[in-house]
Amino acid sequence: MGIPSVANVAGRASGLADRAVEAYRTRLEAQVQRRRIDSLNLSMLVNASMAAVGMVVDVVALQVRVNALQHALDEAIAAGDLETAEVLRGQQVESPVSAAGAHGIKTTEFERNLMFFLGIGILVAVPAFKTITHLPPFMGMLFGLGVLWLVGEIIHRGKTDEEKAGLTLVHALMRIDMSSVIFFIGILLAVATLEHTHILSALAGWFGETIGRLDLIVIVIGLISAIVDNVPLVAASMGMYSLEQHPQDSFLWEFLAYCAGTGGSILIIGSAAGVAAMGLEKIHFFWYARRIGGLALIGYAAGALVYILQYRLTHA
């Protein structure tokens, strides 16, 4: 085996150096490319963040301006400077009838009264339907919905499809607030879970040991209804006390219906209707608590006292 010459060793070393330099150059270019991509992503992120911050600032400024204009408008109306019909940039506000007419919805007084009283009658007839047929109440609601649908199709049969577009029951069902429906379904599922785990019965036992008197327990539940919505509260109360212990139309259920329904008006957040009124009429929580809360509490206590006295006099 011969000794390699100096030229061969130098050639091999030069080749290795070239490959090392090429590999280093490739790695360096890859790092530069990655840094360019990172810099581009960072720039895009900064631009998006600045745009988002600008949008938030614009929305806040617009909301502040709207609140200021609303406050000035309320003061002007309270002072009698503006009439009720001139509140929209000096232009007269269209009434609901004219606004509806602008969309092609034309109905007679007979049709409006028929659908209104038929809907109210169906709601009232659901308990009678359950008593007569011994079917679940939702079956009565679905049957009444079918009747309402049929009557609506009959009285509007002479109208065109464009005229009937906003008058059909399908249109009404499309406008259902599914978030509220899912909210109440979630409430009932949560209450059912608490009932099956015997937490509600344990809570009823704790109330009985701590408070003792049934009328005071119901009054406390009514006061809790000022904070907690009355629908889950009544549903939870139905799981706390059984019909075997407290049959239908007993003192507990009648007094609970009054306390939970009326106690929810002590604070505006105590009922879904109060929360909706806050959004529609721009009623502030603390304004309601100062102006209405005390009167509602006095009315609640007076009504509870009157009912207890009436019950004792009629069941003595």
Image: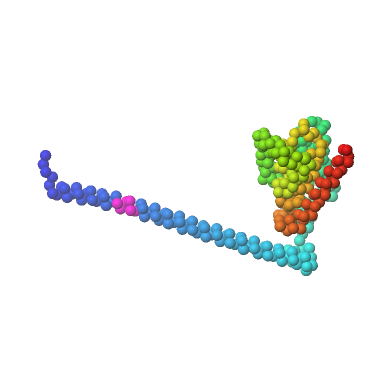
Query: For residue 102, which quarter of the picture?
Result: bottom right
Residue 174 magenta: no
Residue 80, above or below 128: below
Residue at 72% over, 41% down: 210
Residue beneath the point at 76% across and 50% down? 265
* Residue 91 seen in render: no
Which of the image's four quarters has the N terminus?
A: top left
Task: Indicate the position of residue 211 as horizontal and vertical percent values.
Answer: 74, 41
Q: Where's residue 254, x and y in %?
A: 81, 40
Q: Quadrant of residue 309?
A: top right
At 68% from the left and 41% from the top, the residue drawn is: 187
Give the quadrant of the C terminus: top right
Residue drawn at x 36%, y 55% is 32
Residue farthest to the left? 2
Q: Is residue 111 above or below residue 244?
A: below
In reply to whether residue 26 is colored magenta, the answer given is yes
Q: Is residue 148 above or below residue 49?
A: above
Judge from the rendering whether residue 159 lies leftward or rightward of residue 2; answer left or right.
right
Q: Report the span colored magenta.
A: 24-29
In-front residue for pair 88/112: 88
Q: Main secondary structure of the magenta part?
A: helix
In this orientation, which residue lies closer to the viewer: 119 or 277?
Answer: 277
Would residue 58 appear left or right of 1 to someone viewing this image?
Answer: right
- 47 vs 80, left or right, is left
